[in-house]
C-alpha cells in the first residue's frame, strides 16, 4: 500500500541519499492526495522538479502548501530546457496559475504573457491551439482584474469571449467556456460600476449553464457561481422583485447540491442594505414555488434578526 512521510517532518529527510529517496517514491506510487503529492515533490530527483511542481499544483488549490518546497531558479532553468513549444507554453500557463495563487502577480503575468505569445504563434499554423489562446487570455483577464487594471482585464476577457464564440459556432462543446467568460465579464462590469452591462452578461451565462445543466448536473454548480454575484448586484440596485425568481432558483440548487450557504452572506459580504418589509413582501410575491417561498421567508427572518442584534450591539 505504500506509506506517507508526515508533512511536518519532511525537512528532516534532506540527508537521505538518492537510492533511499527512490525507494520511498516507489512506495508512494498510486497514492493520491495532497500529502502524497508533497512527498513526491520533496523526494523526486532534481531533474523532475518542474514536472512535480506542476503535478501537485494542477488544480490551483495546493499552491500555499507546496510553496516552501519550490526551487524557483530550478523551475526557470528547466523551463528553458523544454524544446517543444506547445509543451513549454502549457508549463508557462500553469506556472502563471501557480504564481497567481501564491500572490506573485508580476511573476504570474510574465509566465502568462510568454505562454500567450507562443500559443498565438502556434495557432496561426494550427487552429487546434485557439482554445489554449483563449484560456490564457481569460487568465490574463483575471490577473489584470486582481491588479486593478480593469481596462486591460476587459480587453483580454473580450478577446477570449470573441474567440470562444467563434469556436462555438463550429463546436458546441465550447458553450461552457463562453458562459464562464460571460460570467467573468459580468463580474468585471460590476467592478466598473456598469451594472446594466453586468446584468446582460450574467443573464447570458445563466441561460447557457441552465440549459447545459439538463445534460449534466455539474453545470448547475456553475450556474450557482453566476447566481450569487448576480443576486448581490440586484440587491445593490434594490431590485427585490426581480431578485425573487433568482432566489428561488438559487435555493433549488442549494438543496440539490446540499451546499451550506445562507442568505446572510449576501448581505454581510457586500454590506448591502437590508430590504424593508414592503420590499420583502414584493420579493416573496414574485416567488412561485411554495416550498421555496417558505425557505426564503424563514431565511429572511433569520437575517433580519441577525441585523437587529447587530444594531443593538452597536
Image (cartoon, helix red, strand yellow):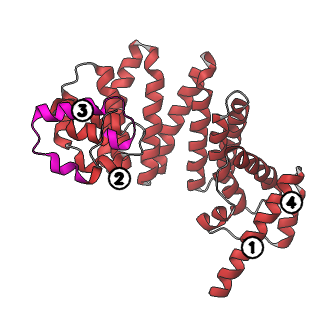
The residue depicted at 53 percent of the width and 26 percent of the height is 163
Which disc, if any, is residue 284? 4
What's the magenta region? 9-37
Q: Nearer the viewer, mark 2 or mark 1?
A: 1
Badge number at residue 304: 1
Spot occupied by residue 211 in the image (x, y as percentages of width and height): 73, 31
* Label 4, residues with CA under 10 Å away: few <14, some 14-19, many ≥20: many
Label 4 vs 1, first from the N-terminus: 4
Q: Secondary structure at mark 1?
A: helix
Quarter of the picture containing the N terminus is: top left
- Between the residue at mark 3 and the residue at mark 2, the CA separation in whole angstroms equals 30 Å
Task: Compare marks 3 and 2 and give the one earlier in the sequence.
Answer: 3
Q: Position of residue 212 (x, y in %)?
A: 69, 30
240 in relation to 10, above or below: below
- Of the two numbered discs 3 and 1 on the same chain, state the one appearing first in sequence: 3
Do the residues under discs 3 and 4 have CB atoms within 8 angstroms? no
Mark 3, other Cα within 10 Å: few <14 / some 14–19 / many ≥20: many
- Residue where numbered disc 3 is placed: 25
Q: Nearer the viewer, mark 3 or mark 1?
A: 3
Tell which circle, 2 or 1, labels the residue nearer the N-terminal end: 2
Q: Is residue 112 visible?
A: no
Between the residue at mark 4 and the residue at mark 1, the CA separation in whole angstroms equals 15 Å
Q: Dot 2: few (<14), some (14–19), or many (≥20) neighbours within 10 Å?
A: some
| CA gap, disc 3 and disc 1 | 56 Å
* Res 42 label: none
Amino acid at each position: 500500500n505504500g506509506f506517507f512521510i508526515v508533512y511536518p517532518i519532511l525537512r528532516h529527510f534532506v540527508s537521505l541519499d538518492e537510492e533511499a529517496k527512490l525507494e520511498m517514491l516507489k512506495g508512494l506510487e498510486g497514492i493520491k492526495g495532497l500529502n502524497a503529492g508533497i512527498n513526491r515533490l520533496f523526494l523526486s530527483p532534481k531533474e523532475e522538479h518542474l514536472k512535480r511542481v506542476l503535478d501537485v499544483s494542477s488544480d490551483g488549490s495546493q499552491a500555499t502548501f507546496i510553496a516552501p518546497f519550490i526551487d524557483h531558479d530550478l523551475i526557470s532553468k528547466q523551463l528553458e530546457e523544454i524544446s517543444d513549444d506547445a509543451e513549454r507554453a502549457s508549463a508557462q500557463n500553469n506556472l502563471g496559475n501557480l504564481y497567481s495563487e501564491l500572490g506573485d502577480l508580476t511573476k504570474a503575468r510574465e509566465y502568462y504573457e510568454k505562454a500567450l505569445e507562443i500559443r498565438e504563434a502556434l495557432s496561426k499554423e494550427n487552429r487546434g491551439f485557439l482554445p489554449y489562446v483563449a484560456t490564457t487570455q481569460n487568465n490574463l483577464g483575471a490577473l489584470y482584474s486582481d491588479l486593478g487594471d480593469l481596462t486591460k482585464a476587459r480587453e483580454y476577457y473580450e478577446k477570449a469571449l470573441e474567440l470562444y464564440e467563434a469556436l462555438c459556432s463550429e463546436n458546441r462543446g465550447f458553450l461552457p467556456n463562453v458562459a464562464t467568460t460571460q460570467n467573468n465579464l459580468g463580474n468585471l462590469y460590476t467592478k466598473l460600476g456598469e451594472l446594466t452591462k453586468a446584468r446582460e452578461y450574467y443573464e447570458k451565462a445563466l441561460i447557457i449553464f441552465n440549459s447545459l445543466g439538463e445534460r449534466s448536473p455539474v453545470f448547475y454548480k456553475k450556474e450557482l457561481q453566476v447566481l450569487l454575484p448576480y443576486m448581490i448586484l440586484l440587491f445593490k440596485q434594490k431590485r427585490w422583485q426581480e431578485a425573487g425568481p433568482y432566489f428561488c432558483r438559487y435555493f433549488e440548487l442549494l438543496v440539490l447540491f446540499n451546499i451550506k450557504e445562507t442568505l446572510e452572506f449576501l448581505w454581510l459580504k457586500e454590506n448591502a442594505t437590508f430590504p424593508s418589509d414592503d420590499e420583502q413582501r414584493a420579493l416573496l410575491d414574485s416567488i412561485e414555488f411554495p416550498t421555496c417561498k417558505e425557505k426564503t421567508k424563514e431565511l429572511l427572518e433569520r437575517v433580519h434578526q441577525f441585523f437587529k442584534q447587530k444594531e443593538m450591539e452597536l
